[in-house]
Image (spheres, rainbow, N blue to C red):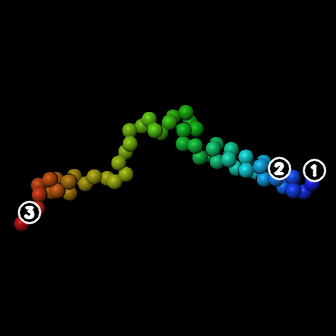
Amino acid sequence: MDVEQLEQLAAVIVTAGLVAGNFLLFTPWRNGEDPRQQTPKSLIPRNESVHRSEQAGPSG
């Protein structure tokens, strides 16, 4: 086996290891729960006083 084939084999093994590590460490449903099944939470908290003033319309 020449050096080029050895480099290619090493690159494939390293890449497969990185992909497997990424999958095992960062898959959000690795605990058996799929996060897509949850109801989405709003990322922006709603301020009820601002919301009410927007519904009342402009004053003035």
Specify the label residue 59 is tagged with: 3
Query: SS at mark 1?
Result: loop
Q: Do the residues labelled 2 and 1 touch (CB within 8 Å)?
A: yes
Specify the label residue 9 is tagged with: 2
- Viewer-proximal residue among 49 and 39: 39
Query: SS at mark 2?
Result: helix
Residue 24 left/right relative to 32: right
Query: SS at mark 3?
Result: loop
| Residue 49 shows up from this direction | no
- Viewer-proximal residue among 49 and 20: 20
Amino acid at circle 1: Met
Which-is-in-front pick, marks 2 and 3? Answer: 2
Q: Identify the residue at the far bottom of this view.
A: 60
Amino acid at circle 2: Leu
Q: Which residue is drawn at 58% across and 38% down?
A: 30
Badge 2 density bin: few <14, some 14–19, many ≥20, Cα 10 Å: few
Give the residue number, with chain letter if any, for mark 1.
Answer: 1
Residue 16 in the image: state x and y as whole percent.
73, 46
